[in-house]
Image (spheres, rainbow, N blue to C red):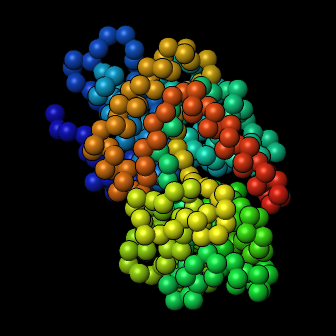
Amino acid sequence: MSKNPSPFMNRRQLLSMSALTIVLPAWAQAGYPSKPITILVPFPAGGTTDILGRLVGRHLATRLGGAVVVDNKPGAGGAIGSAMVAKAAGDGHTLLMGTIGTHSINQYLYKKLAYDPFKDFAPIALVAMVPNVLVVNASQPIKTVKDLIAAAKAAPGKLTYASAGNGTSIHLCGAMFEQMAQVSMTHVPYRGSAPAIADLLGNQTTCMFDNLPSAMPHIKSGALRAVAVTTAKRSAALPDVPTIAESGVAGYDASSWFGMWAPASMPASLVSRLNEEIRQILAQPDVKQILKDQGAEAAPDSPAQFAAFIQTEAAKWSKVVQTANVQLD
């Protein structure tokens, strides 16, 4: 039997698949899992959530001794797929690879959400943190956060920041910057990060608070200038780039993050077991390197720590959404 392909080394193959089934060795253990485990990814194939879901699923398959299927159910900012997991049986055979959006932001954006992010799920583990990075076209005179603030205050509403769409974490990073830096800029939403980056490269917008993985190639090429990262500490991928907080906007801290959930009815003993398995996976050197290559960092924690983190993030982003008056149907 040939080895399973790396989700990073064979990206084209992943993009051509709507689901990935990982078949396990014949020595698969008895008991759990008693049937294939489905990790539902509520976003399209090829994105960061999908990559992480396949990475964790591949290793879970080997460790648990059963087949793992990674299935993409995109739509409504992750709400469609998340609702499907919320209604599934809590027997450990249906899991969700969710995000900051699905569990700390969506409930404040959508008037009607088909799931309760707190009551309908059992948090298993925080998997990875991905910094966002404030970038500008390299031809722009803006080199620091102070430069951007000064330019924005000199011409209120004239500077623009691009995003992957209304209500995305990229959009809200910009909204939080406006609020905390006390500046007024104009938000320009796009249908995805790629077209937003394209217009930034064409100098059609002033700046963008993009996910580090998608911005990194353009930073490395010199087309975009990394002004600052959005996290509380500097990114290992860009150690010479300061944080927004240390650049003058005290307390600014924002990142995209990804985790694993189960339906709320799943027994605590099974939640604990899966948490330990994921922690062991994230501790592996090869997994750490794969995450690092993507500009992400492993963030293993306990179910209780993850639950508390979700609540803290939700409180923070609810204020940002309400102040920015962002509402989606």
Asked where in the image residue 52 lies, by quadrant, the reply is top left
| Residue 13 in view in this figure | no
- Relative image position of residue 1 (x, y in whole percent): 16, 33
Q: Residue visible at 37% across and 10% down?
A: 31
Q: Is residue 185 left or right of residue 216?
A: right
- Relative image position of residue 165 (x, y in whole percent): 66, 62
Q: Which residue occupies the extreme top position in the image?
A: 31
Q: Is residue 84 above or below residue 105?
A: above
Q: Is residue 168 left or right of residue 241?
A: right
- Relative image position of residue 36 (x, y in whole percent): 40, 24
Q: Which of the pair 235/75 is nearer the observer? A: 235
Q: Is residue 63 above or below residue 150?
A: above
Q: Is residue 202 above or below residue 278?
A: below
| Residue 219 in view in this figure | yes
Q: Residue visible at 51% across and 21% down?
A: 271
Q: Is residue 115 left or right of residue 11?
A: right
- Relative image position of residue 312 (x, y in whole percent): 68, 40
Q: Residue visible at 47% across and 69% down?
A: 241
